């Protein structure tokens, strides 16, 4: 019904000039402006005062046995009545070296407390010179037959010890548990359930840290599987479960990458086995021991960053991607830099515009004088401009002007201009209030747009004051969608590298959007039922539904003098159409963790967020 009404309204806007119709349109848009915030200030989306924050629970250590000195009766009691049954089996792999006995015992207790019982734990002692925790291991062996303790005669390093455990594993699935970390009681059950029910190749979970005595801190809410983001940030971490036969076929972990061995392994694993799932719950507690990366990101020196870049470079080379992996501006970040091009496919830049001579002139001057890309076509989609200065600027050499008549409809104007004049293999939809500041912005976007599985590519857009205006679009804000990280400092890392590294997003803004012309035509261009808003989000979601990844690229930076021409116009019917069409997608953005609040664009945890507190720790 909404589609029929929307279609009728779109047709009548174009042909009905009666006074009552125009009056209705003005009143409807005026009401929308009063009911909805402008995009510029979309963080303050509620007129009612925000709810009072929930009281923080009192921290509780993640172990019940802090004063225990005799572990044997504890293990025996916890193991009583546990019977492994059914399939599949999961093998937990742990390389151990000089661990503290309490920490090792707490890891063991977290396994004995699992609701899923068909597991085995394989611990490989990597020739530890200290022997105290080995007595605890002996107690565990006596009470728990599913525990296997292997002592290596010589130090193999973390990869060698993990590979020894992998080769001894008998489960269909394997997961890695550090010798001093803690599992949530439902960790294995939820991982196996996801792997089996969804036929996944791998699954990972959210995590947090616990300090040396077990107090929880720093919850880490991760996005769904995002291969581009993973190249820049080792965000998967723990808990990670994979299929044992796949891991063995890859020869396990590479000793040359000790320190980032999990990262390098999963780069190789994901290349061949891309069905990867995410459980947005804190199911793993990472110990912040002194000297560990969990305690300080620079704990292991520059070697980690060098190894990370090397792992990504080898990964890019295996995939034949023409790019160089370079250290990011923050520790443990990798920046992907496109290699110099040998070919330059035709790129058509389509700019909808009307009057606004000063704005348009700045856009075209910087586009023609600063952009270094050589094979460029500029198409001005002119919506009945009457300003002589604007008309004169569009008549400069190198500009193709297409006149688009009728009531303003952003989607229709773009579609008409593209059909009439754009001859590029790639399209860039560009607002007339964009100012170019980076000569190589097209090269950075084109590197991604050329890849066969990528749909829309968006740039990092900045307000004139230098703060972030667009760093990707997330679903669910204001009931529809909004730009994430508005007003952030662009030199910041963002949430876990989300502002520093390219990553998958559900949508990008059409203020600057690149896409293959063939894909644009394949999905039918922009949907003209949207008059002013959400055409870009709808377009990106249609690309995503067709199996394409949409990418935000922070290395392509431009200024966006937002809404100089459209100002505060807001269309409630566009909003209704967006919600009616994409309600399911809006409810669950795969690249924005559900533990984050949808009333702020700055990664605030929601009041109901899983914080890894007393509700989930071993109490």
Image (cartoon, rainbow, N blue to C red):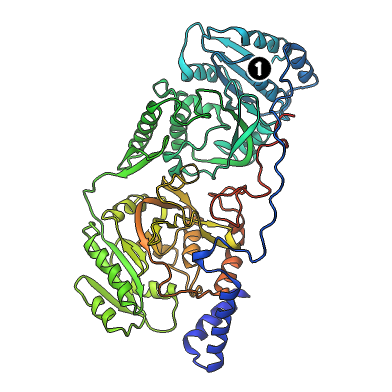
- Residue 181 is left or right of residue 248, and the answer is right
Left or right: 28 in relation to 256: right
User: Position of 216 compared to 543: left or right?
Assistant: right
| Residue 301 coordinates in the image, percent (x, y) | 40, 26
Q: Image quarter for residue 463?
A: bottom left
Q: Is residue 434 above or below residue 345?
A: below
**Outermost residue to the left:** 397
Of the pair 37 and 399, the residue shown nearer to us: 37
Residue nearer the viewer, 573 or 608: 608
| Image x and y of residue 125, in percent | 55, 12
Quarter-wise, where is residue 378 in the image?
Answer: bottom left
- Which quadrant of the rendered structure holds the C terminus? top right
Would you name the residue on which mark 1 appears? 102
Q: Eyeballing the image, is 15 above or below 170?
A: below
Residue 229: percent from left, percent from top? 45, 43
Residue drawn at 49 percent across, 28 percent down: 293
Residue 380 visible within the image: no
Where residue 425 sits, quadrant-wise, is bottom left
Determine whether 458 is above or below 336 in the image: below
Q: Is residue 364 visible?
A: yes
The local secondary structure at tag 1 comes to helix
Q: How many marks?
A: 1
Q: Residues within 10 Å of mark 1 (few under 14, many from 20)?
A: many
Q: Compared to 430, does 568 lie above or below?
A: below
Q: Position of residue 9 (x, y in %)?
A: 55, 82
Q: Split into 4 quadrants, where in the image is the N terminus? A: bottom right
């Amino acid at each position: 019904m909404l589609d029929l009404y929307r279609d009728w309204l779109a047709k009548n806007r174009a042909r009905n000039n009666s006074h009552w119709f125009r009056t209705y349109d003005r009143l409807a848009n005026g009401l929308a402006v009063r009911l909805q915030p402008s995009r510029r200030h979309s963080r303050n989306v509620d007129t009612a005062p925000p709810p009072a924050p929930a009281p923080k629970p009192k921290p509780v250590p993640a172990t019940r046995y802090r004063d225990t000195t005799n572990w044997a009766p504890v293990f025996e009691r916890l193991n009583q009545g546990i019977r492994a049954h059914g399939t599949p089996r999961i093998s937990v792999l742990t390389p151990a070296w000089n661990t503290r006995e309490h920490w090792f015992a707490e890891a063991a207790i977290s396994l004995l407390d699992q609701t899923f019982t068909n597991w085995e734990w394989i611990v490989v002692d990597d020739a530890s010179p200290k022997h105290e925790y080995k007595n605890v291991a002996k107690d565990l062996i006596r009470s728990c037959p599913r525990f296997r303790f292997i002592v290596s005669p010589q130090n193999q390093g973390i990869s060698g010890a993990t590979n020894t455990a992998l080769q001894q594993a008998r489960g269909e699935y394997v997961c890695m548990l550090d010798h001093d970390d803690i599992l949530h009681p439902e960790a294995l059950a939820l991982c196996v359930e996801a792997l089996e029910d969804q036929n996944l190749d791998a699954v990972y979970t959210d995590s947090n840290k616990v300090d040396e005595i077990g107090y929880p801190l720093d919850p880490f809410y991760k996005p769904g599987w995002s291969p581009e983001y993973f190249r820049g940030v080792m965000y998967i971490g723990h808990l990670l479960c994979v299929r044992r036969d796949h891991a063995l076929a890859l020869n396990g972990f590479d000793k040359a990458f000790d320190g980032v061995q999990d990262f390098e392994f999963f780069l190789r694993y994901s290349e061949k086995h891309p069905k990867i799932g995410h459980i947005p719950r804190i199911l793993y507690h990472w110990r912040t021991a002194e000297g560990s990366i969990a305690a300080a990101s620079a704990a292991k020196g520059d070697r980690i960053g060098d190894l990370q870049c090397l792992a990504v470079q080898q990964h890019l080379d295996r995939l034949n991607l023409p790019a160089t992996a370079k250290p990011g501006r923050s520790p443990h970040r990798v920046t992907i830099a496109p290699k110099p091009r040998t070919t330059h496919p035709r790129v058509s830049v389509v700019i909808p515009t009307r009057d606004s001579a000063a704005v348009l002139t700045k856009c075209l001057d910087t586009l023609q004088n600063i952009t270094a890309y050589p094979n460029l076509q500029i198409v001005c989609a002119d919506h009945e401009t009457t300003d002589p200065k604007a008309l004169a600027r569009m008549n400069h050499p190198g500009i193709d002007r297409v006149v688009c008549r009728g009531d303003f409809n952003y989607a229709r104007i773009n579609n008409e201009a593209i059909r009439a004049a754009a001859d590029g293999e790639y399209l860039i939809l560009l607002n007339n209030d964009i100012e170019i500041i980076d000569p190589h912005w097209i090269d950075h976007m084109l590197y991604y747009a050329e890849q066969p599985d990528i749909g829309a590519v968006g740039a990092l857009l900045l307000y004139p004051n230098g703060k972030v205006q667009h760093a990707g679009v997330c679903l669910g804000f204001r009931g529809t969608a909004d730009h994430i990280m508005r007003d952030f400092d662009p030199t910041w890392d963002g949430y876990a590298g989300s502002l520093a590294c390219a990553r998958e997003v559900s949508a990008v803004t059409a203020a600057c959007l690149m896409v293959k012309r063939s894909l644009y035509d394949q999905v039918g261009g922009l949907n003209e039922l949207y008059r002013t808003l959400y055409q870009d989000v709808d377009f990106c979601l249609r690309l995503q539904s067709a199996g394409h990844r949409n990418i935000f690229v922070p290395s392509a930076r431009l200024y966006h003098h937002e809404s100089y021409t459209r100002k505060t116009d807001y269309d409630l019917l566009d909003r209704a159409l967006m919600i009616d069409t994409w309600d399911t997608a809006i409810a669950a953005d795969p690249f924005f963790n559900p533990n984050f609040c949808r009333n702020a664009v700055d990664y605030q945890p929601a009041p109901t967020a899983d914080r890894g507190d007393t509700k989930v720790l071993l109490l």
